[in-house]
Image (spheres, grey):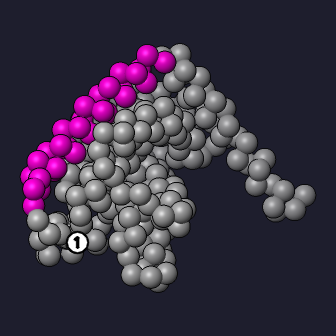
Amino acid sequence: MTRAGTVPGHLRRYAPFTAASLQGLLQYRATFLINALTAATAVGVQVFLWRAVYAGRSGGLPGGYDLPQLTTYVLLAQVLGLMQASRVDEEVSGEVQRGDIAVSLLRPVSYPLARFAAGLPVSLTNATLVAVPVVVLYALVLPLSAPSPQGVLLFGCSAALSLVIGFGVNLLVGLAGFVTTNVWGVRIVKDSVVAFFAGQVVPLALMPGPLAAVAQLLPFQGMVDGPLRLLLGRYHGPLGAAGILGVQLVWAVALSALVALAWRGAVRRVEVLGG
């Protein structure tokens, strides 16, 4: 069998994790309604706060935005944050606390890939059943910036990379449970740091220069700010778009490698403590 033919068979090992996660989600369909209401409320607080701050302002807004663009950015920043809330950090640390991680060591699959396969349905269902209705709702009542077809295509590619980056960050926090046992405090700090430096709380273009420069050096900007800059056309030509995607790709690969190293270290720690 050729090498190309072996890839689908290898990936099919992870299909049961995706199917089991999706079945679990569908058993609690009322959760989607609750999540949609919660998301709509949280998005509304952010959107109307920013609109109130800049209401009636003549001329352009800071960072080169106009009000519809800023509204679109703030709205979709919350949506991207919702898509990346797969709770993999909480679930992994819970497995470590309960000792269920020992069962995962016996499975002939990569644990990080299995967790990604299980978390993917959560992100996709949040996007389709929660995020899309919320965006449609606010599009009916607020003026938003209409993206170009090219912007939508670039946003789709960038959003996919943002999921990989977000998963890598969350899984690393979950694997910290092998050291700290309880990662609740680490998760709280991570959520705050990521939301701020990703551009979910404040667009990076509105930050002071030195702070924005620091944010651009971190992987978190590829989770929110990068995809939204591509969607809104806030880049300089094809090279600018390629640069945003290239930085995301580098961070996605780097975090994947770091996750693999962290998992190997965690396995050795389990073997030492349990052996």
Percent across and percent down for residue 156 are 52, 57
Q: Is residue 233 left or right of residue 199?
A: right
Name which residue lies at 22% across and 45% down: 47
Q: Which residues are magenta?
A: 29-57
Q: Nearer the viewer, residue 187 or 109?
A: 187
Name which residue lies at 53% across and 16% down: 27
SS for callout 1: helix
In the rendered view, tell whether residue 177 sits above or below residue 254.
above
Residue type pointed to by label 1: Gly
Name which residue lies at 81% across and 61% down: 4
In the rendered view, tell whether residue 38 sits above or below residue 231.
above
Q: Main secondary structure of the magenta part?
A: helix
Name which residue lies at 14% across and 76% down: 209
Q: Which residue is mark 1?
A: 64
Taking the image as drawn, is residue 35 in sight? yes
In the rendered view, tell whether residue 244 sits above or below residue 260.
below
